[in-house]
Amino acid sequence: MPAAIPEHERTSTQAGRVLLPLEACEQLCAAFESDIAAPQALARIEACREAMFGAGLLTVNLVVGRPHAGNPDFQLQRAWSSRPVDYPVGGGKRKAATPWTEQLLVRGEIFVGEGEAALAAVFDDSARILALGLRSVINVPLVAAGECQATFNVLGGRGEWQREEVAAVRLLAILARPFVLQIASG
């Protein structure tokens, strides 16, 4: 697992780009060039996330139920967690129709929530999230067959995300997508 990269080494002053730490990039390439199981792939992606952004939380939630006549809510189930004691795999939640569910789960658009008020507006467990020192979230929809099948969720201690950081999280989500879909189908 790559060591966390100090803040001053995480960003490049060239054209405002965030650079993937070389060690993390090399480890991801080596891991994905061979056969690797989904849990190990997600652990490597988490190590890369941590190297880029420091302490935080990465979870992957599968969409296991969609609104229908008998149930107006989405049902999500946690398929992977970087902090399984705090957010165990298998945990589930119901999400009623909100602007967040419309954006992320219906339209399949990324959601960036910054600050305590944004977290409280979206998450029923925001007090728990805040108690872990987390202050912002990036939810990336993982879309297949025209529908959001899962969400790739990165929470961090920062109050806001830079555009380059959001792009880097989206890239990690793209790397995770085939492994998450493998979990969903298995």
Image (tube, grey):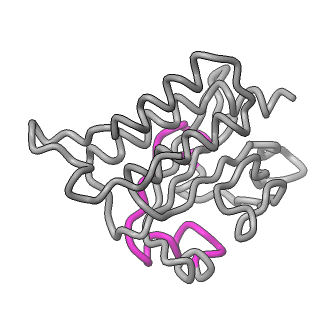
The residue at the far left in this view is: 14
Tell me where the magenta segment starts and ends, as one range: 102-126
Out of 83 and 98, give the one closest to the viewer.
83
- Residue 130: horizontal and vertical position, in percent? 52, 79
Q: Is residue 32 left or right of residue 63?
A: left
The residue at the far right in this view is: 70
Out of 170 and 1, give the one closest to the viewer.
1
Compared to residue 75, the image places residue 117 above or below, namely: below
Which residue lies at the image location 56% right of the left edge and 83% below the top edge? 131
Compared to residue 178, the image places residue 124 above or below, namely: below
Residue 157 located within the stretch drawn in magenta: no
Q: Is residue 24 left or right of residue 143?
A: left
Which residue lies at the image location 52% right of the left edge and 56% below the top edge? 99
Q: Is residue 24 left or right of residue 177?
A: left
Which residue lies at the image location 72% right of the left edge and 28% below the top edge? 181
Out of 53 and 30, give the one closest to the viewer.
30
- Residue 132: horizontal and vertical position, in percent? 56, 77
Residue 76 at least partly seen = no
- Residue 83: horizontal and vertical position, in percent? 66, 62
Residue 172 at least partly seen = yes
Residue 120 located within the stretch drawn in magenta: yes
Which residue lies at the image location 56% right of the left edge and 51% below the top edge? 153
Instruction: Tell me the quarter of the picture where residue 118 sits.
Output: bottom left
Q: Is residue 186 left or right of residue 32?
A: right
Instruction: Tell me the quarter of the picture where residue 35 sits.
Output: top right
Compared to residue 25, the image places residue 136 above or below, namely: below
Looking at the rendering, in which quadrant would you find the C terminus?
top right
